[in-house]
Image (cartoon, grey):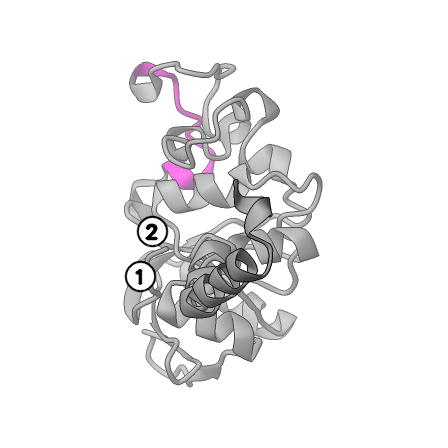
Amino acid sequence: MKPFENFRGIVLPLDRANVDTDAIIPKQFLKSIKRTGFGPNLFDEWRYLDRGEPEQDCSGRPLNPDFVLNDPRYAGASILLARHNFGCGSSREHAPWALADHGFRVLLAPSFAEIFHQNAIKNGLLPVALDEALIDQLFVWASGEKPLEIEIDLHNSMLYPVMPGSTPIEIVIDPFHHHCLIHGLDDIGLTLEHVDEISAYEQRRRNEAPWLFG
C-alpha cells in the first residue's frame, strides 16, 4: 500500500447523505477482485444516463450533466466531501477500490459506516469525520465559482482549507490507523513487520515437531 504523503487536492462536493456502497460501485461490477479498473464505474448509476455493464468501454457512454462528478470545475478532484453515514450498506471492499482508482485519497463527512471506514483505511484512503458545522462550511466554499482546495498534513494531523479567512482544522484519527496510513501498511504489510519473529517461530516448530513438515 502506498504511504500517505502530505498533499493538496481539489474538493468534490457530493451533497448527499447515506451514500451506500451500491451507489459507490453497483453490484454488477463485483465479479472482479483485481482492485483496479473500477474508477470508470464509480457512482455509475448517478454518473451515466445508461446502465453500465462489466468490461464495458465507458468512454462513449452518455454522461449525466447534473451529477457533480461530471462538472468540469472538479476535474482531477482527490478529496470527496459528503454528508453523514457515507459508505453504508454492504461491506464490499470494491467501494474504496473504486474511489481510490478514480483518484480520491481523502474522504470528508460527519460520519462513516464502520465497515466502510475500516476498508477505506486498509486501502490507503483517509476518512476524516468532522463536525457537521465544519462540513456545512466546506460545502459552501466547495460549491462556489472557484473550486476549494485543501492541504492535508497527516504527520501533524492537520487540515488546511485554501481559502481566505479559513483556520486550520485538527484531524482526529486513531493512532493505529495513523501509523498504518503514514507507513503504507495494510494487513499484509503489518504482518511482514514481524517477519523475523514468524521465521523464528517456524524454525522452532520444525525443530520441535519435524514430522509436521514432511
- Main secondary structure of the magenta stretch: loop
Circle 2 SS class: loop
Residue at the spot of label 1: 9
Which sits earlier in the primary sequence, circle 1 or circle 2? 1
How far apart are the two marked residues, 1 and 2, measured between alpha carbons? 6 Å
Q: Residues within 10 Å of mark 2 (few under 14, many from 20)?
A: many
What residue type is disc 2 on?
Answer: Ala
Give the residue at x 62% y 51%: 116
Residue 103, position as x, y percentages in the image? 34, 47
Is the Cβ of the residue at disc 1 closer than 8 Å to that at disc 2?
yes
Instruction: Point out the stretch of residues depicted in magenta.
Output: 60-70
What residue type is disc 1 on?
Answer: Gly
Residue 54, position as x, y percentages in the image? 46, 16
Image quadrant for the N terminus?
Answer: bottom left
Residue at the spot of label 2: 77
Residue 203, position as x, y percentages in the image? 47, 61
Give the residue at x 53% y 30%: 46
Q: Nearer the viewer, residue 58 or 31?
A: 31
Residue 134 seen: yes
Is 214 left, or right, of 181 in this rendering?
Answer: right
Is 88 left, or right, of 207 in this rendering?
Answer: right
Q: Which mark is residue 193?
A: none
Residue 173 seen: no
Q: Nearer the viewer, residue 148 or 32?
A: 32
Q: Nearer the viewer, residue 7 or 74?
A: 7
Is 27 left, or right, of 164 in this rendering?
Answer: right
